[in-house]
Image (tube, rainbow, N blue to C red):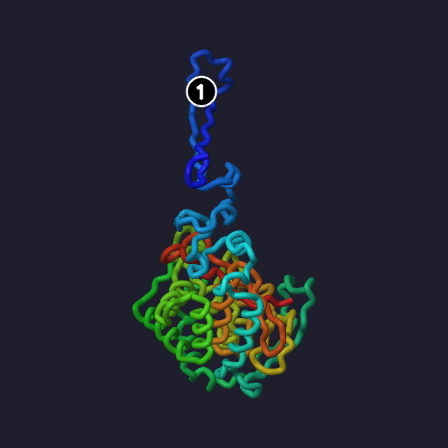
Amino acid sequence: MASGGYSQPATSSWEVWLGNGDKDAAPKAVMMEVTLSIKPKAKGITLHDLYTAPDSCEGRCGEPYNEEDECHCDTDCERHHSCCEDYYRHCWPEGFSSSRDAITDEDLLRISEQLYKADHNKAKMTDIVLNPQYQASPDETGDQEDRSPQPLYKYVNEELFSKPTYASFIKLLDNYQRVTGREEEVTAEELREQDNFLKEVMKTELMKKLFAFLHKKNRYGSEQEFIADLKEMWFGLYSRGDGEQDSSGFEHVFSGEVKKGKVSGFHNWIRFYLLEKQGIVNYFSHNFNGPWDTYPDVLGLQFNWDGFYKEVGSAFIGSSPEFEFGLYTLCFIARPGRACHLSLGGYSLSIQTYTWTKSTYGNGKKFIATAYVISP
């Protein structure tokens, strides 16, 4: 035993065959002896501990950040929302709640109710009149059959859209090419529109509450840091095609995309209403209607977007832009790649997010690939 609790290096040798075919049948074959010296970091570490799955934190807790790793186990991975899924199991021995900075399931239920109550810009019941018509069974959602002859929206009070967060949100919706594989060209004006939207939503009580919660959980040191990260995670470009910078989390979730002949993303009621009003979206049916008797509500629906079909698309109805933006952000930070269980007005609701794994920003942070309400 070496001093300081470290074990002596283990050394093993192998003969390595560098020829072709059977080495016994080739007398002039080249042989080389390779010696591998393994120096365990601490007492009790076995060879098995040093070779763990690239998507696991087993044996990797606290290791330095390496941009080539699939996921991370360093102390900052929570802030960068890049931890491996089993980070808390391996790196917090007493479980998820052992860290005062951990976001527990109970925390999510509490903060989601607070954000729900803080959505002062949501639609009133008199602001929107829906006509859901046909409810499709699970076997019918893929039929691409229009079973609802009338539009989904009978009436929307468009005075809602003059509110600053709505107006700045709507300006963003025409900044994208919907077909993946086509490079997005972001103009100076579009960048200003992104900044203006973030400025307006951060004025709201809802987003201030979300920042205060994340700040308390040590995810962000300042509001400026939070806003800068929101801009990257939501508006940063990446490629869903063959290398073109053709997509972003915001485009996918709120504006919608077309990939391989199908609608992808498109989870926003305002976008749907505006396109339906223009005759570009045709509502077919719904498969889920939430239990809320006030807005925001949730609808699972089927529709055609100018020739492309969405088999099951879920969306909040009547929520403010900051409400959706805030809830999706919360779940992406707290439960990336997993179901995020919330409570809205006493009713349970879950949001699914996924990280974009093929490229990163900053110090290994992940972009938003998608976020949506899970509809039964």
Q: Which element carries disc 1, helix, strand or loop?
A: loop
Q: Is residue 241 left or right of residue 289?
A: left
Q: Is residue 263 visible?
A: no
Q: Residues within 10 Å of mark 1 (few under 14, many from 20)?
A: few
- Quadrant of the image containing the C terminus: bottom right
Name the residue furthest left: 188
| Residue on which disc 1 sits | 19
User: Front-most of 45 and 121?
Assistant: 45
Q: Is residue 18 left or right of residue 96?
A: left
Q: Is residue 363 visible?
A: yes
Q: Is residue 157 left or right of residue 348?
A: left
- Place of residue 18 in the rendered image (x, y in percent of width and height, measured from the top left): 43, 22
- Place of residue 179 in the rendered image (x, y in percent of width and height, measured from the top left): 45, 60
User: Front-most of 272 and 165?
Assistant: 165
- Place of residue 122 in the rendered image (x, y in percent of width and height, measured from the top left): 51, 82
Amino acid type for the residue under numbered disc 1:
Gly
Name the residue furthest bottom: 126
User: Front-most of 55 and 267?
Assistant: 55
Which of the 4 image quarters holds residue 288? bottom right
**Where 82 sits versus 174, above or below?**
above
Q: Is residue 12 left or right of residue 191?
A: right
Which of the 4 image quarters holds residue 284? bottom right
